Amino acid sequence: MSLVALFIEEVSFHRYPRWSDMLRGVVAAVLENFGYRQVLALWQVWGAVSAWHGRPAVWETMHRTGFETEEAERTEDTEETKTATVGIHN
C-alpha cells in the first residue's frame, strides 16, 4: 500500500525533486513490512499449536480508566438517579 501511495503521489504532484528522495521512500516502504508481520505470524502459530494441544485460551482482565475526574462521575451518577426517580413517579 505504501509503495502504491508513493507512486500515485509522485505521478500526481511530483513532490520528490531528487531520485534519492524517491529511493529513500521506497526503501522505507519495503522495510516497514519486516518485523511486526513476522512476530504476528509466530503468535498465530503459537496459538494454533496451543489450541491443538487442548490448552484453554486465557484472557486477562483489562482494567479501564477514563479521562473524567471523580467529581464528574459523581455528577453523572446523581443525574442518572434523578432521571430514574422521576421516571418511577410518573
Image: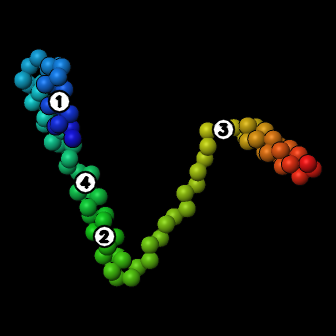
Q: Position of residue 39 (x, y in %)?
A: 27, 57
Report the front residue among 7 and 62.
Answer: 7
Q: Earlier in the sequence, mark 2 or mark 3?
A: 2
Q: Earlier in the sequence, mark 2 or mark 4?
A: 4
Task: Mark 3 vs mark 1: give the one in front.
Answer: 1
What SS does tag 2 mark? helix
- Dividing the image into 4 quarters, which one contains the N terminus? top left
Crowd around label 2: few <14 · some 14–19 · many ≥20 (10 Å): few
Q: Which mark is residue 86?
A: none
The reply to whether residue 85 is in sight is: no
Which residue bears the numbered disc 1? Answer: 8
Which residue bears the numbered disc 3? Answer: 68
Q: Which residue is depicted at the point 81% across and 41% down?
A: 79
Which residue bears the numbered disc 2? Answer: 46
Q: Residue furthest bottom?
A: 54
Left/right placement of residue 67 relative to residue 90 reads: left
